[in-house]
Image: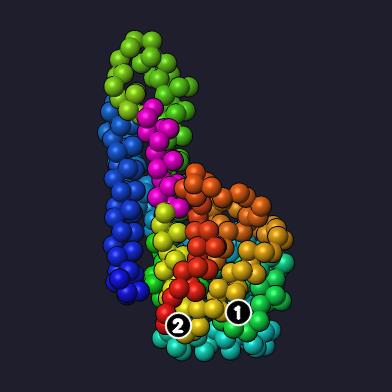
């Protein structure tokens, strides 16, 4: 399988995952409608999911930049960084994205935005200080690959859908266990089937949503690594950058669970990796990514 067929396969699988998200949201809405005897809840779930996706499409980059406290820079602020981004954009056939800096000592980077014409690349101060030119090129090429592979919109939609599922299941939990109708249903023994289905959804839906989010993020990271290596024609540059990032133990103060999957490497430090924890990781283990890069022939 070539990198191009792998990209097509991953994109198809990602859309399947997103379709499952929407089906899961509608299923939650349907159960809530039957349990509370109001089909309007189903329509609310459908409309709310559409509106949330619309909001995320137009404003996700602004939200991410505000959460990370990134600040924009001009070419005069860092001419070398701008030259690297400009040269790689020309090679990749992409418009120049806006460039932002995070005043953080941990070497890391991320890309955000709704499409290639409205994209942003953000790098930390630590990345600029600790990487040489070929390593920095590898990181920038990785982030540009996220833009070229159309990962940005997909990852943003996943974030919104996960949040929506958590909100819907939390709403069901609160209404079922604390609401007046929920107490009456339990006392009368009615609607037991829908109550049990809803209880299962309350427990499993957020877990399934998070697992799918993590699976999508991991696949996109592997693909962006390969695409970035193809762009620079030097996989070792990114491999060495990932080694330096993995060894750096500086915390990233602006890191949080909502945005952690956007970074080139997990911004949280000190966690142990095992077969169970891998399921809940937003990134593949760096050792696996480095090995894949060094086995790559470009």
* Residue 206 among magenta residues: yes
Q: Is residue 178 left or right of residue 53?
A: right
Residue at the spot 53% in from the left edge and 87% down from the top edge? 86
* Residue closest to the eye, 78 or 108: 108
Q: Quadrant of residue 158?
A: bottom left
Residue at the spot 28% in from the left edge and 62% down from the top edge? 12
Q: Tell me which segment is drawn in magenta.
A: 199-214
Whether 204 is drawn above or below 266: the answer is above
* Residue 136 among magenta residues: no
- Asked whether the viewer can see residue 65, the reply is yes
Q: Which residue is mark 2?
A: 231
Q: Outermost residue toward the top?
A: 188
Q: Which residue is mark 1?
A: 136
Count how many numbered circles sit on residues in the image. 2
Residue 201 in the image: state x and y as whole percent.
37, 33
| Separation of marks 1 and 2 at Cα, in angstroms | 13 Å
Q: Is residue 246 left or right of residue 20?
A: right
Residue at the spot 46% in from the left edge and 65% down from the top edge? 221
SS under mark 2: helix
Number of residues whose C-alpha sits closer than 10 Å to that of mark 2, classed few (under 14), some (14–19) or many (20 or more) = many
């Amino acid at each position: 399988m070539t990198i191009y067929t792998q990209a097509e396969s991953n994109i198809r699988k990602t859309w399947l995952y997103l379709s499952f998200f929407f089906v899961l949201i509608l299923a939650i809405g349907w159960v809530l409608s039957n349990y509370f005897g109001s089909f309007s809840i189903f329509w609310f779930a459908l409309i709310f999911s559409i509106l949330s996706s619309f909001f995320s499409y137009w404003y996700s980059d602004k939200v991410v930049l505000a959460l990370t406290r990134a600040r924009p820079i001009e070419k005069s602020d860092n001419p070398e960084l701008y030259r690297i981004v400009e040269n790689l954009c020309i090679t990749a056939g992409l418009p120049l994205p806006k460039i932002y800096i995070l005043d953080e000592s941990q070497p890391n980077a991320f890309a955000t935005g709704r499409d290639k014409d409205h994209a942003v690349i953000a790098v930390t101060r630590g990345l600029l200080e600790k990487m040489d030119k070929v390593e920095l090129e590898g990181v920038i090429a990785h982030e540009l690959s996220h833009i070229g592979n159309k990962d940005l919109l997909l990852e943003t939609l996943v974030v919104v859908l996960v949040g929506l599922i958590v909100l819907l299941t939390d709403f069901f939990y609160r209404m079922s266990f604390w609401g007046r109708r929920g107490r009456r249903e339990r006392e009368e023994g009615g609607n037991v089937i829908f109550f049990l289905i809803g209880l299962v959804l309350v427990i499993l839906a957020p877990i399934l949503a998070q697992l799918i989010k993590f699976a999508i993020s991991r696949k996109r990271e592997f693909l962006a690594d390969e695409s970035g290596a193809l762009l620079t024609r030097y996989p070792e540059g990114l491999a060495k950058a990932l080694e330096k990032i993995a060894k750096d133990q500086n915390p990233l103060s602006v890191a949080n669970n909502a945005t952690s999957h956007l970074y080139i490497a997990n911004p949280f430090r000190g966690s142990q990796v095992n077969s169970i924890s891998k399921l809940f990781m937003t990134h593949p283990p760096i050792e696996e990514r480095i090995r894949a890069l060094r086995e790559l022939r470009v």
